[in-house]
Image (cartoon, helix red, strand yellow):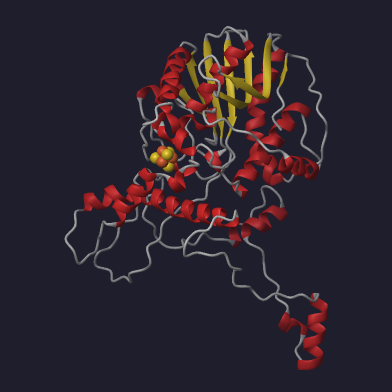
Amino acid sequence: MSTALTMSPGYVFKRPTYTFEELKKKVKETVGSHSPLGASQAERYFVCPGSVRLSKGIEKKSSPYAEEGTLAHALADYFLCHGKWPKGTPKEFIEPLAVYVEAVMADYIGLVKNGRSGQLGVEEEFHLSTIHPDLWGTADAALWISEPVLKLIVYDLKFGRGKYVKVYNNRQLLFYALGALFKWKVPAQEVELVIAQPRLPRPGDEVESVDEMFSVTYNKDRTLSRWSVPALRLYDFAAELAESVRRTDDPNAELVTGPHCKFCPAAPICPARSGTSLVLAQEEFSPALPYDPNALAAVLPYLDEVEDWVKNVRAFAYNEAERGVDIPGYKIVQKHGKEHWIADEETVAAHCELFYGVDRDEVFTKKLKTPKQVREVCGKGADLSAYTSKRSRGRVLVPDSDPRVSVRPDPTQEFEVLEPEWERVEENEQGE
Ligand code: SF4
């Protein structure tokens, strides 16, 4: 769904109209292409230059989270072009996407109302082929305005709810901004990067510098962040990008593990990652053995990485076997089945009543929906607080940066040793 479109004030986008179901089908049929050096990969290859070479030829399987993200982007794109949602769009899409489309529309309408000249691009592809032929990516939206200052605004929608993405120094958006300046050939004094992450408000208040503290702003719900920077920053970024790309061409480019490994296509076969996992697997901690809490703390941040690696290797091996690759000692079998009805409900109930004298009420169950589901039925703003309470499902160990208040353990209290519990949220691809 990434047809390039630009408009100037007053222009009306002409695009085919669809219902929600039609658009969903169209999105499923569309096969997107990604560059190995594309904008959305920049955060990874800046840190791990070897990942580009190692990922060559590896096809990444889509996931339901990625498909949901692609559909959300297509819906937002549709709204920006038509000024309305496709008929039948569910509110679980409309409500979060409104944060993004309203931000773009408000900036654009401000431009038109004040009679300024400018240009808006929606789902527009930007190339940086003067640096490298594989450098291209598609920006969710970009807006250039001529007054009161020459300014370029680049917008990015992150529909995922797993990983919060910071706008400050965001390489993906700097890439798009540079691409827009190259393509549109417009002058700019200021560049503004905007990330809408409507389903994951900014957690905590951690900043990496005083500059970030004063230059990044947030909306009330902390679901929209804006970072303004002088356009000259793009010159530095262009040099950093060229140097990073040069490093990816080196046959001995370094492999550097980190959180960016999660979405790396080479993760299942990466020697650096399996090496980390195997080294960690040799660590042993037990209350019965002397151990250093600092060593324990040093291991904890890597556990997500190891879990992801295990998950990736399992999925990769399964897909390879499905492709017909013979993996010694392994075979594909049917999963254990779960018994289910093949006759309709009434036939089953009548059978049980006739032959076993069982009353209908005994074979049917009626259950109240969850508070979230009931709230959705009752409508926005429904007050059910008198009938609900939030019961904690227990305690969990999280990093200090987590915004929740620490619960001090009581060493005098006897407790049962439970299976360790880790809190993880499934993420969509790159948080997009
Ligand atoms: S898995 Fe991590 S270390 Fe390995 S190539 Fe990918 S990004 Fe680099």
Residue 303: x and y, percent? 37, 52
Q: In the image, is 83 to the left or to the right of 235? A: right
Q: Residue at x 68, y 14 (%)?
A: 119
Look at the picture and state if 42 lies above or below 64: above
| Quarter of the rendering containing residue 286 | bottom left
Q: Quadrant of ligand 1?
A: top left
Q: Nearer the viewer, residue 423 or 26?
A: 26
Q: In the image, is 322 to the left or to the right of 162? A: right
Q: Is residue 220 visible?
A: yes
Residue 369: x and y, percent? 66, 63
Residue 2: x and y, percent? 69, 29
Q: Nearer the viewer, residue 353 or 394?
A: 353
Q: In the image, is 206 to the left or to the right of 91? A: left
Q: Residue at x 71, y 33 (%)?
A: 1
Residue 162: x and y, percent? 51, 45
| Quarter of the rendering containing residue 336 | bottom right
Q: Residue at x 46, y 25 (%)?
A: 216
Residue, far bottom = 356
Q: Nearer the viewer, residue 316 or 77?
A: 316
The C terminus lies in quadrant: top right
Q: Is residue 260 visible?
A: no
Look at the picture and state if 236 lies above or below 340: above
Q: Nearer the viewer, residue 391 or 22?
A: 22
Residue, far left = 290
What is the total number of numbered labels drawn onto the structure image? 0
Q: Residue at x 37, y 45 (%)?
A: 271
